[in-house]
Image (cartoon, rainbow, N blue to C red):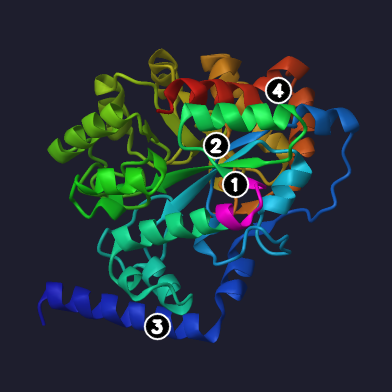
Amino acid sequence: MSAAVRKLAFALAALALLLLLAFAFSPALVEGALNRVGQHPPYAAQPWARELMRDAVDLHADPLLWGRDLLQRSTRGQVDVPRLQEAGAALQVFGAVTQSPLGMNVARNEAAAPDVITALAFISRWPRPTWSSRRARALFEALRLREMEQRSGGALVPVRSRAELQALLAQRARGSQAVGALLALEGSQALEGDLASVDLLYDAGFRMMAPTHFTDTEISGSAHGVSHGGLSALGRDWLRQLEERKIIVDLAHASPQTVDDVLASATRPVVVSHTGVKATCDSPRNLADAQLAALKKNGALIGIGYFRWAVCGDDAFAIARALRHAAGVVGVDHLALGSDFDGAVKTPFDVTGLPLLAEALRAERFTDAEIRAIASQNALRFLLLQLP
């Protein structure tokens, strides 16, 4: 038996085992095991901390994967609309994941590894096209979000343009608890190698896109992939198309070479939606000081994550330490929040625990004005400038 045949046989056997396990456990149980919190609500916090986190913006969360009705408060996961409203949040960026390798890890993942999203789509009874098409998965997740927006009675509103964001902020200034929803593509796997899909996904509401996720793609190398390469020729065309359409480029999972290549060519500011810094957590996915300095020069917005791979800790103080170091390199104005809630990660708290982070930031000697900037104002200013 050739090595290629053995590899294929192993992949098929692994996928069969994954499907068998998936049938044994409902998607709800799978999510309950993956999306955990270190401390369960309710959270004791000072009134000033709650006030500083009002209008919070989070650059990345993945609840669209799990089949929950996000209009209903859940005891599972880390974020939904009622909990966003309790936190006083203004806007949530919802990621759409379309491929994730079995045995996903922060160091090295094969693009040909069995895909867990295939199994998730199957056991969650997603439409049949999603069982084999990554593009269909992205469109289905966008459709789910749109359907929840339409049923929400104005509690969850789409943000696809500067005008829609301005309308949301005006509405909230009049006392509304409406939460904005911005749709992001986590990894270009959904393009399936065809840049014609960019327009299709734009029309479906996507306004932020990443070149890669946990594996290398036709667009670029991943920080967790095999090649650690940069932008391909197709990737350079992809970057030009996104900039023409004012789709925001997200470098959260990009390889260092991809970060360098994008920053060398980009004519618009980028985001790194959920990441950490190597100075406080030396993880392959985190940013070195030289990268932080280059991102500052680009005008980028950097969202610090809440999970162990990002901050090497399990509490709000670890997040605050990462933000303190990043602020020393790029300044407060380039920093934001990027939780990765419901991204198959454990976080210190769910979204209603944001005031705990305000307290930790004050302990790191951030001023109240700086805490507000990190929690909301920087991201809102960035989006008002960069959305179409």
Tell me the CA gap for discs 1 and 3: 28 Å
- Asked whether 295 or 226 is in front, the reply is 295
Look at the picture and state if 348 lies above or below 63: above
Q: Secondary structure at mark 1?
A: loop
Q: Secondary structure at mark 2?
A: loop
Q: Give the residue at mark 2.
A: 281
Query: Mark on residue 372?
Result: 4
Query: Mark on residue 17?
Result: 3
Res 231 visible = yes
Question: How many marks can you see?
Answer: 4
Query: Which mark is in front, 1 or 4?
Result: 4
**Callout 2: few (<14), some (14-19), or many (20+) C-alpha neighbours within 10 Å?**
many
Q: State which quarter of the image contains the N terminus.
A: bottom left
Q: Earlier in the sequence, mark 2 or mark 4?
A: 2
Q: Amino acid at mark 1?
A: Phe
The residue range painted magenta reads: 149-156
Q: Earlier in the sequence, mark 1 or mark 3?
A: 3
Q: Earlier in the sequence, mark 3 or mark 4?
A: 3
Can you give x and y, in whole percent of width and height, for residue 155 in the image? 67, 47
Q: Amino acid at mark 2?
A: Cys
Look at the picture and state if 38 lies above or below 280: below
Query: Which mark is in front, 2 or 4?
Result: 4
Q: Secondary structure at mark 3?
A: helix
Q: Give the residue at mark 1.
A: 307
Residues marked 2 and 3 touching at CB (< 8 Å): no
Look at the picture and state if 61 lies above or below 238: below
Q: Earlier in the sequence, mark 2 or mark 3?
A: 3
